[in-house]
Amino acid sequence: MSQDIGDKDLSFRTPDELARMLEALSRSLHAKNRISGGESGFSWHIAVLLQKIAVLVAMIEDADMWAEGGDLSGFEDLSRDAQAAFLLDFLAGKRGLKSELVNYSAPKQ
């Protein structure tokens, strides 16, 4: 599957530009899936994940999200495992961003 992407420009200067790029990839994948992908559930889920990642990327420089009381306040205080688990839970639709981050811990494995 490793395929040369040719001369496609994948550079971005800001998280917002990356978020827009991810949203465009998601829309493109949704369209290709509808037109020639046989409405694959797998492709649909990948496109939805790209949209959700775009939402997260757009928050990187959003000071309100990181401020006291913001959706991501307290995120940096979590352990690396808890941060990863929180983000994966968000991507899986198990939680929204308005959650109890302070009390969040990685699930026991």
Image: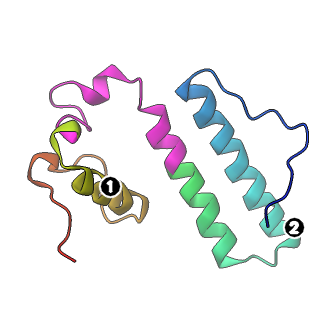
Residue 56: give its label. Answer: none
- The reply, left or right, for residue 77 in relation to residue 30 is left
Disc 1 secondary structure class = helix
* Spatial CA span between label 2 and label 1: 34 Å
Mark 2 secondary-structure assignment: helix
At a point 64% along the width and 59% down the height, the residue shown is 47
Label ID, residue 84: 1
**Residue at image coords 15%, 59%:** 105
Please tell me which residue lies in front, 63 or 75: 75
Give the image location of residue 53, x and y in percent: 51, 48
Q: Is residue 99 above or below residue 1?
A: above
Of callouts 2 and 1, which one flags the residue occurring earlier in the amino acid sequence? 2
Instruction: Name the amino acid type tagged 1.
Output: Ala
| 109 relative to 82, above or below | below
Q: Residues within 10 Å of mark 1 (few under 14, many from 20)?
A: some
Q: Dividing the image into 4 quarters, which one contains the C terminus?
A: bottom left
Number of numbered discs visible in the structure rendering: 2
Residue at 8% x, 53% y is 103
The residue identified by callout 2 is 35
Inspect the magenta stretch and tell me whether residue 72 lies in it: yes
Magenta range is: 53-75
Q: Position of residue 88 (x, y in %)?
A: 37, 60
Question: Is residue 54 one of those drawn in magenta?
Answer: yes
Residue drawn at the location 28% of the way across and 56% of the way down: 86
Q: Quadrant of the N terminus?
A: bottom right
Q: Position of residue 17 (x, y in %)?
A: 63, 27
